[in-house]
């Protein structure tokens, strides 16, 4: 232990993070050891670089932005839909599709105390979001006579509660052995001076590293390997909070296969030029998503020869990846984006502080930054009322109420 303590002290001194041991002597022996181990896992060089990155703003003006083609599902003929459905169903029945649900986010806007997936959006059945998602798998089991593997990405913060919820609910009567959980990575949260914050347990305050962390987490936890062993070819990856998500989609799978695409994404038509959504585009010749904060007014309003927005395909975090590309994506570091958040912490006097203003840097990578690593991708425009009912905010837009109404309308429930 003494040796480890010395090692930790040396590491912290090198990076000016000695305050992390301020309360070391107050901790139990177990906690002391836990703290040292945790500090040793932190890459402080990376922390230093992340802090430096907060001092500069990314410059997008240099990038060449162009429109990217898409296919509109509703414009396909009945024959095409029939053909693709057949091909896709064949792939699914052969057990070549798996699904990953990214449920590691903190869900701060919703403000629910447990994992977002455990939330009851107020359907008359009172199904949780996890159970609503699970219905897709149960339906596919009936329809295709196949148990589709379901992987859930959790975070350090919500892993235990998530697994417990599934256990308590008997995996919603889906075969338990088909469900696997894996934890995503974390990154320390920093104060405005670049010091790692301490949480209420006097341990480094860490937060999930963003949905872009999914690829690395899949590799590190052996998920990609496990999928390969199972003969999986396609992996649908989406968030936990869209209660109309259609993760088992024969048409998407078939078009991607037929067109030899390694990534296939679903999009929705942007409601109006000002809607605050990221849209698909080509950035310097590569597929990309441009955030509403990055797009100029001129580009946002530009129309094509049919009068449609040139940059009108919204990204809804519904993406399907071929297993061949997943490993490559997992071996590439995605950039981190910084957000300034309100984060409670223990100050130098050992007092618990709940700030009223944003006080801390949080770093996250975004899944769609991985698109720039592939030459081409399929974008399939689907219908909003059929596939998108997000639960983001406690009230107002994208809230449990709007999601519930969309869900009930789609399933003709009340
Ligand atoms: P959001 O960006 O909407 O974040 O995530 P959030 O955590 O749900 O909510 P806020 O911003 O704190 O209010 C979109 C999807 O990506 C997952 C979320 O669980 C959600 O399904 N996600 C996000 C992760 O799995 N890990 C992350 O680190 C971030």
Image: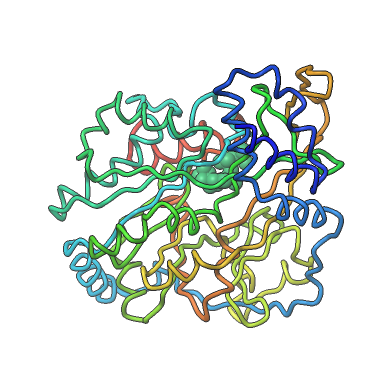
* Residue at 43 percent of width and 67 percent of height: 326
Viewer-side residue, 5 vs 166 = 5
- The image shows a total of numbered marks equal to 0
The image quarter containing residue 380 is bottom left
* Residue at 79 percent of width and 66 percent of height: 297
Asked if residue 330 is positioned above or below residue 63 in the image, the reply reads above
- Residue 287 in picture, x, y percent from top left: 57, 74
Viewer-side residue, 276 vs 5 = 5
Looking at the image, residue 17 sits to the left or right of residue 7; the answer is right
- Residue 334 in picture, x, y percent from top left: 61, 63
Q: Quadrant of ligand 1?
A: top right
Asked if residue 274 is positioned above or below residue 88 in the image, the reply reads above
| Quadrant including the N terminus | top right
Question: Is residue 397 in view?
Answer: no
The image quarter containing residue 17 is top right
- Residue 296 in picture, x, y percent from top left: 79, 67
- Residue 387 in picture, x, y percent from top left: 42, 52
Viewer-side residue, 359 vs 384 = 359
What is the image's colouring? rainbow
Question: Is residue 145 in view?
Answer: yes
Looking at the image, residue 230 sits to the left or right of residue 263; the answer is left
The image quarter containing residue 255 is bottom left
Looking at the image, residue 85 sits to the left or right of residue 16; the answer is left
| Quadrant including the C terminus | top left
* Residue at 69 percent of width and 49 percent of height: 363
């Amino acid at each position: 232990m003494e040796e480890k303590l010395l090692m930790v002290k040396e590491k912290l001194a090198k990076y000016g993070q000695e305050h992390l041991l301020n309360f070391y002597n107050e901790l139990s022996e177990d906690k002391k050891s836990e703290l040292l181990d945790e500090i040793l896992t932190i890459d402080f060089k990376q922390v230093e670089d992340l802090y430096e990155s907060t001092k500069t703003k990314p410059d997008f003006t240099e990038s060449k932005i162009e429109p990217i083609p898409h296919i509109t599902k509703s414009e396909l003929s009945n024959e095409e839909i029939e053909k693709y459905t057949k091909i896709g169903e064949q792939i699914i029945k052969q057990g070549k599709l798996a699904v990953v649900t990214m449920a590691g986010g903190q869900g701060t806007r919703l403000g629910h105390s447990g994992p977002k997936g455990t939330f009851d959006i107020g359907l008359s059945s009172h199904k949780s979001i996890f159970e609503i998602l699970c219905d897709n798998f149960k339906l596919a089991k009936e329809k295709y006579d196949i148990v589709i593997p379901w992987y859930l990405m959790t975070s350090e913060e919500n892993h235990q509660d998530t697994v417990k919820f599934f256990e308590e609910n008997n995996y919603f009567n889906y075969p338990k052995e088909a469900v696997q959980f894996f934890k995503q990575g974390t990154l320390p949260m920093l104060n405005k001076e670049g010091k790692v914050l301490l949480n209420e347990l006097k341990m480094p305050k860490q937060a999930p590293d963003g949905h872009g962390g999914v690829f690395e987490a899949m590799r590190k936890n052996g998920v990609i390997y496990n999928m390969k062993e199972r003969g999986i070819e396609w992996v649908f990856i989406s968030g936990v909070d869209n209660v109309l998500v259609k993760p088992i989609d024969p048409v998407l799978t078939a078009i991607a296969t037929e067109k030899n695409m390694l990534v296939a994404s679903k999009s929705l038509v942007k409601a109006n030029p000002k809607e605050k959504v990221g849209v698909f585009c080509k950035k310097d010749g590569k597929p990309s998503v441009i955030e509403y904060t990055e797009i100029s007014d001129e580009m946002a309003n530009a129309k094509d020869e049919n009068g449609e927005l040139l940059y009108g395909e919204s990204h809804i975090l519904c993406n399907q990846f071929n297993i061949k590309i997943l490993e490559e994506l997992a071996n590439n570091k995605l950039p981190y984006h910084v957000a300034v958040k309100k984060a409670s912490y223990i100050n130098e006097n050992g007092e618990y502080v709940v700030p009223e203003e944003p006080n801390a840097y949080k770093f996250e990578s975004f899944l769609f930054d991985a698109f720039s690593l592939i030459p081409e991708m399929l974008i399939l425009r689907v219908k909003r009322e059929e596939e998108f009912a997000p639960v983001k905010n406690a009230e107002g837009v994208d809230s449990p109420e709007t999601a519930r109404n969309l869900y009930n309308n789609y399933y003709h429930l009340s």
